[in-house]
Image (cartoon, coloured by chain):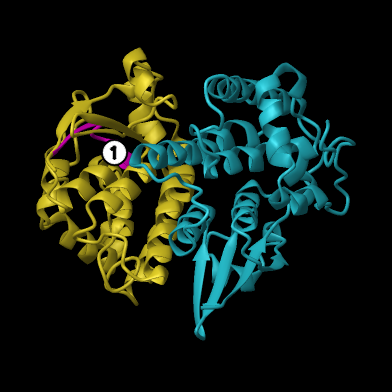
Chain colours: A cyan, B yellow
Amino acid sequence: MSVERTLHHFPLDPASRQVRLALGEKRLPFVEVQVRYWEGPTEFLKLNPSGLPPVLIETKHQRTTVIAENRAILEHIEEQEPEPALLGREPGERAEARRLLQWFDRKFDNEVNGFLLHEKMEKRLLRLGAPDLSSLRRGRDALRQHMDYIEGLLNTRDWLAGRRMSLADFAAAAHLSVIDYFGDVPWKDFPATKTWYMKLKSRPAFRPILADRWPGLAPVAHYDDLDF
Amino acid sequence: MSVERTLHHFPLDPASRQVRLALGEKRLPFVEVQVRYWEGPTEFLKLNPSGLPPVLIETKHQRTTVIAENRAILEHIEEQEPEPALLGREPGERAEARRLLQWFDRKFDNEVNGFLLHEKMEKRLLRLGAPDLSSLRRGRDALRQHMDYIEGLLNTRDWLAGRRMSLADFAAAAHLSVIDYFGDVPWKDFPATKTWYMKLKSRPAFRPILADRWPGLAPVAHYDDLDF
């Protein structure tokens, strides 16, 4: 039953981080391969035609399965390694966790990352010049709206999707952790979110994320500080 | 074990159509409520804070579950009503179907719908004026690239994700059917895709989709023609 896993990922990609957190939380070891996806490497396009990380490759009984895209990987891991359950057990819990997965991967990604991370990260990786200030402002304004929403949920729930920690927490933390790397999360205005993030940040699965560094992109000073 | 289902949807929304096709294929009856989501109705925001359809409401043993967003609903239906299986049974099949679900909901949606459907549908619903021709062209160019990709898959596979019909086919057909409503699918240049779409179009689950009409938005003449 031993499974060998290789994860192709980019350290500062929120989708990749969701998978690293889920694998870490389930204590499933994996070999990592870092992908410079913005350079469109031909070999990687064979693994995922969209050209985007993450891609998980599993080998079990000499049979190899390629699983591309974060949602596919998260659902796969949950089916293959159900304990500890990260999607909830009741249909209502699972629905709520999955609703939030879609919220972060589509709405947050479009409204926040499409501006903030595009300006601060992608433009540097692609050498597209200095950040555009009005796009940065637009991304920061959207981030505050999303944090209002998260704060509201956490004022009535222990974890984002309800009483139990779930993939929804990892999705949110994966996104916020990348934005935090660039120093743009206004933690002090969102105390419940800050407390929630401190709890996640101190989990063993989070350690590799806090150790991430990318050449030419330095993190903000408090990035890996557990008591920020 | 009787379950009462109500689906809140918009007839020309690709995400809603995926769910209608999956429910239809599994022969699960449901009451439908049409949502004018672009008007941001307050009642609907309580069901789904993102403001987007579809939302499925299930009542079973007097217990109500709200499932919002298409991926959450598709996974939920598959878990609750596994037959006929629409995600495949093998991990590799499921991974491939889910990869394609993400392809259509993110890549196709951003690159094609964000231009074509925005110009032809959303701008009319929102009374934002005439379509912008360069955006229409950009959407049509992207559509051709996506159809090249679909055609390539269908030249080596019976169905998009492999040997069996799956949710990946419904996702692709849901997206293409909305664009076809507006007459923008260049079927004649993609023979394998056309044959595949004819097969899907003739399934009973597709009938309600072909009967959709929205006031002020007339479909192209061949829209509901099974032999187009």
Crowding at mark 1 (Cα within 10 Å: few <14, some 14-19, many 20+): many
Image coords of residue B203 (percent x, y): 12, 56
Residue B222 locus on image (x, y percent): 15, 47
Q: Please give the range of residues in magenta.
A: B3-16
Callout 1: chain = B
Q: Depth check: B155 or A75 in front?
A: A75
Q: Nearer the viewer, residue A18 or A197?
A: A197
Quarter of the image that includes the N terminus of chain B? top left
Residue at image x 70%, y 20%?
A: A191
Residue B186 against residue A132 in the figure, above or below: below
Residue A62 percent across, percent down from the top left = 51, 86
Q: As displayed, is residue A51 above or below residue B44?
A: below
Q: Is residue A159 left or right of residue A193?
A: left
SS at mark 1 in the image: helix
Q: Amino acid at mark 1?
A: Ser
Determine whether B44 is above or below A180 in the image.
above
What residue occupies the far top of the structure in this picture? B42
> Is residue A46 a member of the stretch shown in magenta?
no
Percent position of residue B3, x then y: 16, 38
Res A192 seen here: yes
Q: Which residue does the image show at 47% across and 58% down from the upper left?
A: A82
Quarter of the C terminus of chain B within the rendering: bottom left
In the drawing, does residue B52 fall left or right of residue A77? left
Residue at image coords 30%, 44% = B179
Report whether residue B184 is seen.
no
Horizontal side of A116 relative to A89 (left or right) equals right
**Residue where numbered disc 1 is placed:** B16
Q: Residue at x 46, y 46 (%)?
A: A87
Q: Residue furthest bottom?
A: A62
